[in-house]
């Protein structure tokens, strides 16, 4: 230790990435020794005098954490694209920089979003149960058994509208994947503080080779989408935007996919909506209150709901990419250099 600058690392990030830190003999690297996210008590104990801290964080990065580290703290680096667990005004006020990991996970999350749309539409949850429970031999087949809505436009229903609540990097990567599936139209919601821009929509339609792209309000999005992806940030501003009122407006054949944050969806309202057939099905990689989601959860019990344990970015390449970027952000931050990805806190 001596007077080497201290960095606190909330978890081991594997052999591809850790050497970037461990080879830095000029730093005092304090690493949580266990193979799980660190305890808050351990973090608090080790923070005083740190110049940087890197997580997977055990809980909110708030004034308590920033004050504990003290005036030495220059950078917080989070291994996530989401930052609703970080108190931005507190960091801004303390002059602490924030590194995060956008872009590197876009493809992995877009892939999983498409997968969930297909799984929910094609009744994969229910049909897997049939096989696993040995019901297949006894099943009385009909031309319409197991049938669900089709992702692509067809002769019988020649338009297929995909909707995006939030239209950032991951949403646009998801849209690009859906175009070859035969989607015809796209709706998206924009930042309420800005105006809809028909010229932009026209250029998006040309870029994605669609019959129409339109920025709409939440009401139109709910009413007109055949497949609706929730890809907006979490936090108080988006809490329960998908509530009973929203779900009541959805098409009975529509599919809802959430790969962003569970807090955007009112779970009880969605369970009711699925039970009463207001929409066709749902694919969720995130659920409010996660990871405390068990077999008796109203959404897990719904046959038309697929629930996954937050695996959107869980590919080997993506997680290595995220961890590498998080470490590089940390090192650049403490050296006062440009980070690979830094959040602008000037308006926080
Ligand atoms: C991660 C995520 O699984 O990046 C995010 O915001 O939600 C996921 O990619 C999670 O944050 C762990 O790093």
Image: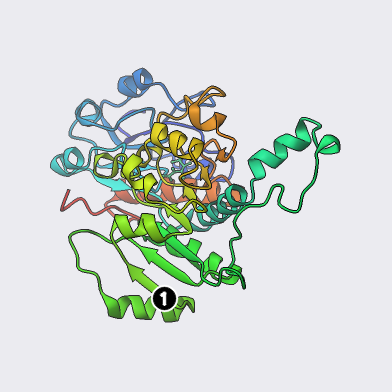
Q: Nearer the viewer, residue 231 or 97?
A: 231
Taking the image as shown, residue 43 lies to the left or right of residue 302, namely left
Residue picked out by circle 1: 212
The image shows residue 193, relative to residue 39, as above or below, that is below
Query: Where does residue 85 sit, x and y in percent of width and height?
Result: 31, 36
The quarter of the picture where the N terminus appears is top left
Residue 264 lies in quadrant: top left
Position of 250 with respect to 133 (left or right) is left
Seen from the viewer's position, the closer of residues 281 and 115 is 281
Query: Quick one: 23 or 263, which is closer to the camera?
Result: 263
Q: Which residue is depicted at the point 71% across and 39% down?
A: 128
From this view, report whether residue 208 is shown above or below residue 341: below
Residue 131 falls in image quadrant: top right
Foreground: 200 or 66? 200
In the image, taking residue 348 as reference, residue 182 lies left or right, namely right
Q: How many numbered callouts?
A: 1
- Residue at 60 percent of width and 53 percent of height: 118
Where in the figure is residue 303, as x and y percent of width and height? 60, 36
Question: Ligand 1 is in which quadrant of the figure?
Answer: top left
Please indicate whether residue 161 sits to the left or right of residue 246 in the image. right
Query: Can residue 270 be seen?
Result: yes
Q: Residue furthest left?
A: 93
Q: Return the x and y of residue 93 as percentages of the image width and height.
A: 13, 41
The answer to whether residue 243 is seen in the rendering is: no
Q: Residue at x 32, y 19 (%)?
A: 45
Circle 1 crowding by C-alpha within 10 Å: few under 14, some 14–19, many from 20: some
In what element is the residue under mark 1? strand
Identify the residue shown where x is 42% and y is 35%. 56
């Amino acid at each position: 230790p001596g007077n080497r600058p201290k960095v606190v690392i909330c978890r081991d990030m594997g052999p591809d990435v850790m050497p970037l830190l461990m080879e830095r003999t000029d730093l005092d690297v304090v690493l949580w020794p266990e193979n799980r996210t660190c305890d808050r008590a351990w973090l608090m104990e080790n923070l005083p005098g740190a110049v940087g801290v890197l997580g997977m964080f055990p809980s909110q990065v708030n004034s308590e954490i920033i004050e504990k580290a003290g005036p030495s703290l220059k950078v917080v680096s989070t291994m996530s694209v989401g930052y609703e667990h970080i108190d931005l005004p507190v960091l801004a006020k303390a002059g602490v920089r924030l590194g995060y990991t956008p872009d590197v996970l876009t493809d992995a999350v877009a892939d999983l979003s498409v997968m969930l749309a297909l799984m929910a539409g094609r009744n994969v949850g229910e049909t897997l149960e049939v096989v696993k429970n040995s019901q297949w031999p006894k099943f009385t087949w009909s031309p319409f058994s197991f049938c669900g809505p089709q992702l692509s436009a067809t002769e019988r229903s020649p338009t297929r509208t995909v909707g995006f609540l939030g239209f950032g990097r991951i949403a646009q990567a998801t849209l690009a994947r859906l175009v070859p599936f035969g989607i015809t139209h796209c709706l998206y919601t924009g930042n309420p503080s800005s105006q809809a821009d028909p010229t932009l929509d026209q250029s998006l339609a040309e870029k994605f080779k669609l019959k129409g792209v339109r920025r709409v309000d939440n009401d139109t999005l709910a009413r007109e989408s055949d497949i609706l992806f929730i890809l907006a940030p979490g936090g108080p501003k988006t809490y329960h935007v998908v509530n009973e009122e929203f779900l009541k407006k959805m098409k009975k054949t529509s599919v809802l996919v959430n790969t962003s944050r569970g807090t955007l969806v009112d779970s009880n309202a969605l369970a009711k909506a699925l039970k009463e057939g207001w929409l066709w099905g749902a694919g969720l990689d995130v659920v409010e209150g996660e990871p405390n989601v068990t077999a008796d959860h109203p959404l897990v019990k719904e046959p038309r709901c697929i629930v996954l344990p937050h695996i959107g970015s869980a590919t080997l390449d993506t997680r290595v990419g995220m961890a590498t970027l998080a470490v590089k952000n940390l090192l650049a931050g403490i050296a006062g250099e440009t980070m690979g990805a830094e959040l602008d806190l000037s308006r926080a």
